């Protein structure tokens, strides 16, 4: 699925949830569906700087595609990170970098988030894009 298709799907999901509490409940539920990252992944190197909550992003590059997993000590931020990881996982570095970085937020992910949580969303997006930029020219068989 392309980034544009994922954006339309995300927008359709959030369009059906207009109540702020229901939207946050959906985001939290998405985070809870994922197992926590193992302790060895919760390193300072994996920590997303600039977030009030502790938030860890694990990035992998396999068979020419980027894959992301996240965890946080905040249920809301874990959910936000999981939705963003799902949005970008499976895409090539070029696809991530060619897409509009505001797509997930514009699709509805940022609606009803506090300014601090929107900042966290932006920081996660920045980290994903930095990872993609570092792997833009990597051969498809490389793993990092």
Image: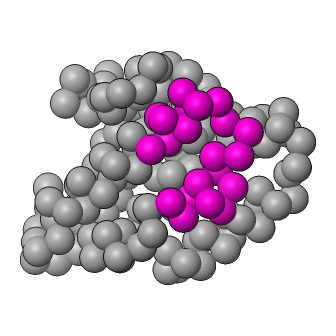
**Is residue 57 found left or right of 15 in the rendered image?**
left
The residue depicted at 65 percent of the width and 62 percent of the height is 107
The residue range painted magenta reads 102-122
Position of residue 69 measured from the top left corner of the image (x, y, whole percent): 40, 45
Image quarter for residue 4? Answer: bottom right
Residue drawn 45% across the image and 19% down it = 52
| Residue under the image location 50 percent in, 80 percent down | 2
- Determine if residue 94 is in view: yes
Q: Give the color scheme: rainbow, by chain, secondary structure or one colour.
A: one colour
Of the pair 62 and 116, the residue shown nearer to us: 116
Q: Is residue 88 magenta?
A: no
Question: Which residue lies at the image location 33% right of the left edge and 32% below the top edge?
Answer: 48
Which SS type dominates the magenta stretch?
helix
Give the quarter of the image for residue 33. top right
Q: Residue furthest front?
A: 115
Q: Which x, y percent locates residue 131?
A: 23, 55
Quarter of the figure that contains the C terminus: bottom left
- Give the image location of residue 35, x and y in percent: 51, 35
Hey, which quadrant is residue 6 in on the image? bottom right
Camera-side residue of 131 and 119: 119
């Amino acid at each position: 699925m392309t980034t544009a298709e994922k954006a339309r799907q995300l927008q359709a999901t959030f369009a059906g949830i207009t109540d702020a509490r229901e939207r946050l409940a959906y985001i939290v539920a998405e985070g809870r569906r994922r197992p926590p990252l193992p302790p060895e992944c919760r390193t300072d190197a994996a920590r997303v700087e600039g977030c009030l909550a502790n938030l860890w992003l694990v990035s992998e590059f396999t068979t020419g595609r980027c894959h992301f997993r996240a965890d946080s000590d905040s249920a809301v931020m874990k959910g936000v990170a999981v939705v963003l990881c799902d949005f970008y996982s499976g895409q090539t570095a070029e696809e991530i970098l060619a897409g509009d970085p505001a797509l997930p937020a514009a699709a509805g992910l940022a609606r009803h988030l506090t300014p601090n949580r929107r900042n966290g969303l932006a920081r996660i997006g920045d980290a994903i894009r930095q990872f993609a930029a570092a792997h833009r020219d990597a051969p498809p068989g490389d793993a990092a």
